[in-house]
Amino acid sequence: MQLLGGLKKGLVFVVSAPAGTGKTTLVRKIVQEFDCVVESVSYTTRPPRPQETPGRDYHFINQQEFEKMSSRGEFLEKATVFGFSYGTSRSAVERLLNRGKHVVLVIDTQGAIQIKKTLDAIFIFIRPPNFEELQRRLHERRSDTQEAIDTRLSWAEREIQEAVHYDYQIVNADLAISYQVLRSILIAEEHKNRYPPQKH
Ligand code: 5GP
């Protein structure tokens, strides 16, 4: 008997959180612990940050390529965030689900709304303990200009208002505790009775 990885077809977990909430760390940790949990790699027109690896963090493409993929219906959901386009590959997600993997989509609230209309997914919102802490974490990252930080903060305020529409909320005040909560959600959701019954 294993904690996770017993389903023939995996589940979709949508994780949204304002920048600087620790979502990347939490998601990377769960992917590392469980072979059956994978993070979907989004497509974006945003230029890579110095520490980012193409194909691992994002598939970096130009606007023309993005529009071509979009017109062919290749995105499960897409959104514009801070002036750049982001999208989730429909075929990549389907392939992973059919291999029994749980797929985590780390996407914004605009994308989450689109998924809600099309898929039976589980929605998790990760929030900072308070606004001051978010401000501090964004400054600490040093990868953004002051203007970018201000834009992210005002966007974060709007995103947090959407948290009520999610199935779960994790207040990330302590990484170790938040991780245990996230892990518990995935384990519980895999063991939930679903109709029609999921094949094991
Ligand atoms: P960043 O550029 O800082 O990595 O991400 C900016 C925002 O875009 C974050 O809220 C992130 O979750 C969101 N994002 C990343 N990939 C996607 C995607 O494929 N779709 C949507 N809707 N949002 C995304």
Image (spheres, helix red, strand yellow):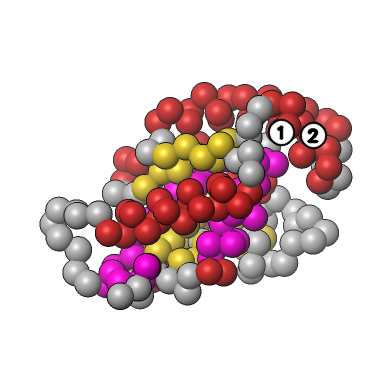
Residue 195 included in the magenta stretch of the image: no
> Residue 62, position in %: x, y?
67, 56
- The residue lying toward the viewer, choosing from 109 and 23, is 23
In the image, residue 90 lies at what x, y percent? 41, 60
CA gap between label 2 and label 1 equals 5 Å
Magenta span contains residue 27: yes
Location of residue 169 in the rendering, given as x and y in whole percent from the top left corner = 47, 37
- Residue topped by disc 2: 136
Please state which amino acid type lies under the numbered disc 1. Answer: Leu
Give the residue at x 66% y 27%. 130
Task: Tell which of 135 and 40 is nearer to you.
Answer: 135
Q: Quadrant of the N terminus?
A: bottom left
Residue 120 is left or right of residue 101, and the answer is left
Q: Where is 122 relative to 149, above or below?
A: below
Residue 19 position (above or below residue 162): below
Labels 2 & 1 near each other (Cβ < 8 A): yes
* Quadrant containing the C terminus in the rendered view: bottom left
Q: Which residue is mark 1?
A: 134
Q: Which residues are magenta?
A: 3-31
For label 2, the crowd category at 10 Å Cα-Cα, with few meaning under 14, some 14 to 19 and many 20 or more, is few
- Identify the residue at image location x=70%, y=41%: 20
